[in-house]
Image (cartoon, rainbow, N blue to C red):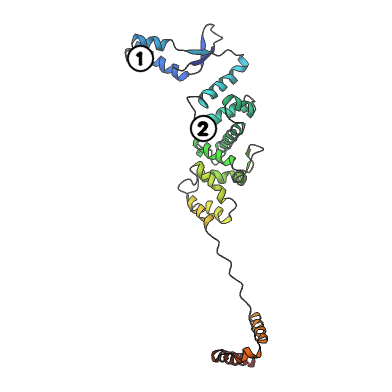
Amino acid sequence: MERIIVVPYEPKPGKFLVVEGNRRVAALKSLIQDNDEGVMELSEEQLASFTKIPCAILLVDKEQRRQAQRVIMGIRHITGPREWGAYQQAQLIQQLHDEEEQEFSSIAEHLGLSTVEVARRYRAMNALKTMERDELYSEKAEPEFYRLLHELVSLPEVRKRFGWDPDADQFTDIDRAREFFELIAPQTKETAEAKLKSYSDVRKLRFIIGNTAAEDVLFDPAKTFAEALNAVTQRTPPAPEPKETISAFLKGALERVRSMTRQELKELSGEDKEVLRTLIKELTEILGE
């Protein structure tokens, strides 16, 4: 069994307080109690094993104990064999930074992560906390959104579009932030389900942001995320060529006739001559009106 971590319990010398491994200790106590009450029967070997378990004593000053506990939790649950989920990891990072006032570089060193990744997880947790506090979206905020917000704060063009300020580590435009919240936790009746469901979806926003037509589809409650992506790939029809004015046409025709040699005029076909006669007749009627 992995060692539990204990600290001396000052009110009762000789006793110790479990700071890491409480669930394991509680489970063992429950098994021993069931054995004592006859609910189950443990062997002598099991009783001996469950009664005396390996532990490590954490000897630090009282002021440093809380920080040490959190660092141990990080080592075990972030880089160790019992890995936490992304949300729990980010929570610990936020506590170490905000409550223990540790720099990102120090947290990174303790937890075996890069400073950049520690900062990114901290910012993503701040983004989620904003959603949890928002009067419109607080009831819809879920830990699962952490991964989506982690992608948001990682992509410069996307975070800018939705009002995230990387220098302030927070949303500075709540209206734009709510546009993103709506994409992951819709409130409008027209939208049946979230448009962004995975970090991959958030990453694809890079292709939509800046494309006016695609953004209009993205924020339309009646449209899907797939339709917004399709709007990016649809080619804009070419602008119609401007119509040539009648005066420009006639000037061009006159210049063409004037540029013709006598030989070219003599060689006009019967069809060409008939077209010219018809044109002269039509022009004569028009000018004579």
Is residue 220 among what the camera can see?
no
Is residue 269 among what the camera can see?
yes
**Badge 2 element:** helix
1 sits left or right of 240 in the view:
left
- Inter-mark Cα distance, 1 to 2: 36 Å
Residue 260, quarter of the rendered image: bottom right
Label ID, residue 86: 2
In front: 93, or 11? 93
Question: What residue occupies the far front of the structure in this picture?
Answer: 263
- Choose mark 1 or mark 2, whichever is in front: 2
Three-letter amino acid code at the position of disc 1: Asp
Three-letter amino acid code at the position of disc 2: Ala
Q: Residues within 10 Å of mark 1 (few under 14, many from 20)?
A: some
89 sits left or right of 53 in the view:
right
Label ID, residue 34: 1
**Mark 1–mark 2 CB contact (< 8 Å):** no
* On screen, residue 36 above or below 74: above
Q: Give residue 19's position: percent from left, percent from top.
A: 52, 17
Q: Residue at x 66, y 80 (%)?
A: 248
Question: What residue occupies the far top of the structure in this picture?
Answer: 14
**Badge 1 element:** helix
